[in-house]
Image: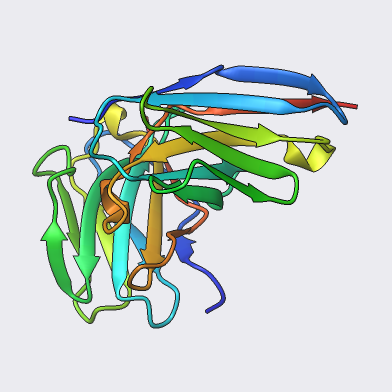
Amino acid sequence: GAGVSQSPRYKVAKRGQDVALRCDPISGHVSLFWYQQALGQGPEFLTYFQNEAQLDKSGLPSDRFFAERPEGSVSTLKIQRTQQEDSAVYLCASREQGSELFFGEGSRLTVL
Amino acid sequence: GENVEQHPSTLSVQEGDSAVIKCTYSDSASNYFPWYKQELGKGPQLIIDIRSNVGEKKDQRIAVTLNKTAKHFSLHITETQPEDSAVYFCAVGPWDSNYQLIWGAGTKLIIKP
């Protein structure tokens, strides 16, 4: 596609529910990143894939967070047993080797 | 680890005037300094970046200056227009690894007509 596509754009979950957020990167982009952006803050790194390999997941805040990219294209960020502190915008970005990061519009998660 | 501070948090300028946003960083090994613009409901978009081997870079109305000795860099927007209204983020990191960028907290730029 023309840009990074994320869905859903908005998700409201009750505390304790599981959620799944999808990212469709720019076609051909090898690298894919997930960021968490709290209100009024800059993005914070969660995890990084090169093709299907998850090379860094040091930013995932707890073992309730899990990301996958099984075929090296679409990625899913899953949050289990959501908590109120998980409320944020989740941004996906992709890039070619050595190029700039291209961000999607984000998925806004609200946990009630 | 790297620490990035961005000022001001909000900046209001008259249309046509200039706007300056400043960031300081702590790790002298950092060599890549991008600026991103984020409009409401959108993801951040790279507007200009600079590497440590250059002191200044300009692209039309936007410029970035870097002082490696003092560990600070600034975004300059001249002849501001209403469409410049957005949140601007600075970031700092190694050139060869965008994902290790450390981001500032952002500056909300308001252009008054």
Residue A60 vs residue B85, the one in the foreground: B85
> Which residue is located at x 20 percent, y 59 percent?
A67
Q: Residue furthest left?
A: A63
Residue A103 location (% of width, % of height): 47, 57
Q: In the rendered image, is residue A10 in sight?
A: no
Residue B78 vs residue A94, the one in the foreground: B78
> Which residue is located at x 17 percent, y 37 percent?
A61
For residue A44, above or below residue A28: above
Residue B96 location (% of width, % of height): 27, 59
Residue B33 vs residue B9, the one in the foreground: B33
Q: Left or right? Give the position of B8 relative to A112.
A: right
> Which residue is located at x 64 percent, y 48 percent?
B58
Q: In the rendered image, is residue A87 in sight?
A: yes
* Displayed quadrant of residue A24: bottom left
> Which residue is located at x 27 percent, y 56 percent?
B97
For residue B98, above or below residue A17: below
* Displayed quadrant of residue A81: top left
Residue B112 vs residue A6, the one in the foreground: B112
Residue A112 location (% of width, % of height): 37, 30
Q: How is the image coloured?
A: rainbow
Q: Left or right? Give the position of A36 relative to A105.
A: left
For residue B65, above or below residue A40: below
Count of marks placed on residues: 0
Residue A20 location (% of width, % of height): 30, 57
